Image: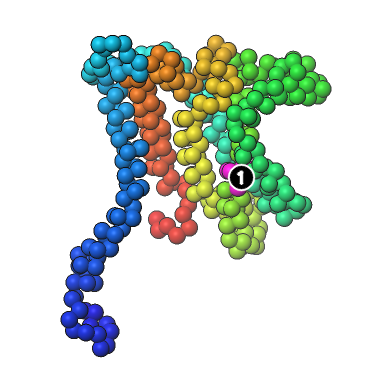
Amino acid sequence: MASTLFAGAPDDIDDSVDAGDGTLARRERRRGLLFVSPWLLGLSLFFLFPLVASLAMSFTDYRLVTGEGETTTFVGLDNWRTMLGDDNVRNGLLVTAKFGLLFVPMSIFVPLGFAYLLTSERLWGRSFFRVMFYLPSMVPFVAAVIVWRFYLNSQSGWLPRLLRAAGWDGTPNFLNDRNWVLPALVFMAMWGVGNSIIIFIAALNGVPTQLYEAAKIDGASKWRLFRDVTWPMISPITFYNVIISLVGLGQYFLVPFVLLGPEGPPDGASKFYTMVFFRETFKFFKGGYGAALAWGMFVVVFAITSLLFWSAKYWVHYEYEER
């Protein structure tokens, strides 16, 4: 075959060189595996093996700290049954779900709104404002949480003072009122939307201007431009941000733990599922039960993510996709 493609090529070139199962192809596959083998080794050692081990652990009474002579035994589905009947788990799921109902929509529409403003041709100093909006996402969250604790203090905090100065005398105690603690945490979460703003700015700048021009010729209003042109064109980026927000929701731990402590005051109103996992695993050393809790959250997030991927065919538009 090679001799027919290149005039004057030696006749002794083996035809199997160009075939998918030829010597050259096998050699390239071996080299490819050699190059990716460090990554495969790391994936197996630090991801797949711990994943399988934690699943196996969830069916045992494994404890992180054991006394002399104590052994780990197989308990079947006991940890999973305990998890389903645990009031703390139900409360943790409820708190996480309430937080997610506010957090996920705001993590999409707040950065999208800012990105819309920061791509406006009428905005002076757009580069400066983009840097200013992105900078907070570079601050370590632990440091930011300490600042927010003072900012939201009901007596001396800047926000309650501003609200009182604006005429709101009965300003709530944001961090100690069970009706306000979750909105306060969502408000704080908006501190780190700089990454999403940058992603949405790139998506908005990638919408072809010809589509806007054609729609304007047809008399489309600004709302119709957004609904029928902008939103479909940026829907893959929106879909990506929704998935990232959901995964982040399942791992939400650092801010409430540092700000409010492991018991989730007031009265467990901020006791997220991850804090229940931390308490059972690292305070009571129930490694087997903790593994079941971790896998329980994985199952929930995986189910919601799968549902979103299924629904994507109805609302996510890919420019070159054939439907």
Quarter of the image with the C terminus in it: bottom left
Q: Is residue 19 above or below residue 279?
A: below
- Which of 293/140 is in front? 140
Quarter of the image with the N terminus in it: bottom left
| Residue occupying image coordinates x 32% and y 38% | 45
Q: Position of residue 190 (x, y in %)?
A: 62, 34
| Residue occupying image coordinates x 47% and y 48% | 316
Look at the numbered disc 1 and give the secondary structure of its residue.
helix
Which residue, given by chain and number where applicable, does mark 1 sit on?
197
Q: Position of residue 185 (x, y in %)?
A: 60, 25
Which residue is most to the bottom? 8
**Residue 296 relative to residue 274: left or right:** left
Q: Position of residue 298 (x, y in %)?
A: 38, 30
- Which of 75/161 is in front? 75
| Residue 188 appears in the rendering | no
47 in the magenta segment: no
Q: Is residue 180 above or below residue 19?
A: above
Q: Is residue 307 above or below residue 255?
A: below
Determine the image quadrant of residue 145.
Answer: top right
- Disc 1 packing (10 Å; few <14; some 14–19; many ≥20): many
Q: Is residue 66 above or below residue 97?
A: above
- Which of 233/300 is in front? 300
Prevailing secondary structure class for the magenta stretch in the rendered image:
helix
What range of the chain is rendered magenta? 194-198
**Residue 296 relative to residue 147: left or right:** left
